Image (spheres, grey):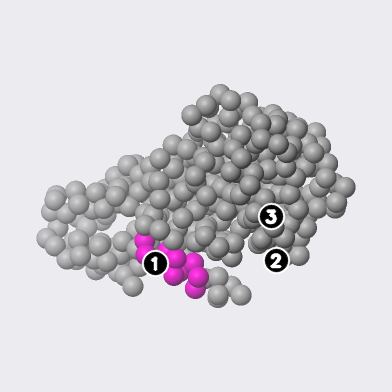
Amino acid sequence: MFKFIKRKITSIFSKFSIGKKLKNLFSRKIDDSLFEDLEKLFYESDLGVRLSVDLTEKIKAILKKDPDLKIDEILNILKNELKKEKVEFKDVEMKKPHVIMIVGVNGGGKTTSIAKLAHYYKKQNKKVLLIAADTFRAAAVDQLSNWAKKVDVDIIKSQIGADPSAVVFDGLKAALSRDIDIVLIDTAGRLHTKTDLMQELEKIKKVSSKVVENSPHETILIVDATTGQNAIDQARIFNSYTPITSIFLTKLDGSAKGGIVLSIQKQINASVKWIGTGEKMEDISKFSFDIFIDDLLSLE
């Protein structure tokens, strides 16, 4: 099973590799222009300004001492440096019901990601319940309802414009009475009204903890990997409203630049736990940081 997961993740991340670009870069004469291009390559890979500068300075200092280093040795140095950026996963004890609040901007793949998580947990023989607390958009409720039918799980919803926290209250009461294992709460992602969003999320959390002690037990941020630096800003905003326990990166089947993984994790001190690799409910994988870094700097 682990070998299958590793192969799947490797095939996903191989498209992000900058190993060949680095090899071409270091086939040139080592001078200031090379290091300028090296820093630019790191930055364009969405590693962020700080990390791009730090890595470039590190390689520059090492090559001054040993200008005959081979590309494999340079890549190994970079791998070791990047692996120091790892944010350790915060293990969360599974309760029953285990309540997971899903947050993220509209259009980032939130609803599809909830369906993928529901499908994943159902495959583990868990009883799953969805709560449609994004009551401001009819499309969101309809979408989630359609996914609930496809995945064959229960859903609690209300009319458009209903108080989201009231829907969550009803949903968690239903979870307790139905002996549900996993509850997934969809929330609105209206970043253009930040104050309303903050108040809404705080109210949902407050109501949730009253019905199920210490819930939500997880708060997962859905991030569209193709949005680059905007994804970091979104992560920072949501984390300031409600502490994020982990990240679900969506749209990694597109042209996303993989370095965004490191940037986001460092910004909010939360690890990437899940990755979405397509539109189907089966297109979900657990994230492996070490495999990701190895692939990012692969020559294959």
The local crowd at label 3, few if under 14, some if 14 to 19, many if 20 or more residues have their Cα within 10 Å, is many
Q: Amino acid at mark 1?
A: Ser
Q: Secondary structure at mark 3?
A: helix
Q: Secondary structure at mark 2?
A: helix
Depth-wise, is mark 1 or mark 2 nearer the camera?
2
Q: Is residue 253 magenta?
A: no
Q: Residue 205: name its quadrant.
A: top right
| Mark 3 / mark 1, whichever is N-terminal | 1
Instruction: Tell me residue 185's x, y (percent).
Output: 68, 44
Instruction: Tell me residue 219's x, y (percent).
Output: 63, 43
Q: Which residue is mark 2?
A: 123
| Mark 1 / mark 2, whichever is N-terminal | 1
- Image quarter in which the C terminus is found: bottom left
Q: Is 166 situated left or right of 254 in this image? A: right
Q: Is 71 situated left or right of 288 in this image? A: left
Q: Which residue is mark 3?
A: 148
Instruction: Tell me residue 139's x, y (percent).
Output: 58, 43
Secondary structure mainly formed by the magenta segment? helix
Residue found 81% across the figure and 53% down from its top:
180
Q: Is 132 situated left or right of 76 in this image? A: right
Q: Amino acid at mark 3?
A: Ala
Q: Secondary structure at mark 1?
A: helix
Instruction: Tell me residue 105's x, y (percent).
Output: 51, 40
- Image quarter in which the N terminus is found: bottom right
Q: Which residue is mark 1?
A: 14
Kindly tell me whether residue 95 is visible in this rendering: no
Residue stretch in magenta: 7-16
Kindly tell me whether residue 267 is visible in this rendering: yes
The local crowd at label 1, few if under 14, some if 14 to 19, many if 20 or more residues have their Cα within 10 Å, is many
Residue found 20% across the figure and 65% down from its top:
24
Per the model, the C-alpha gap separating discs 3 and 1 is 33 Å
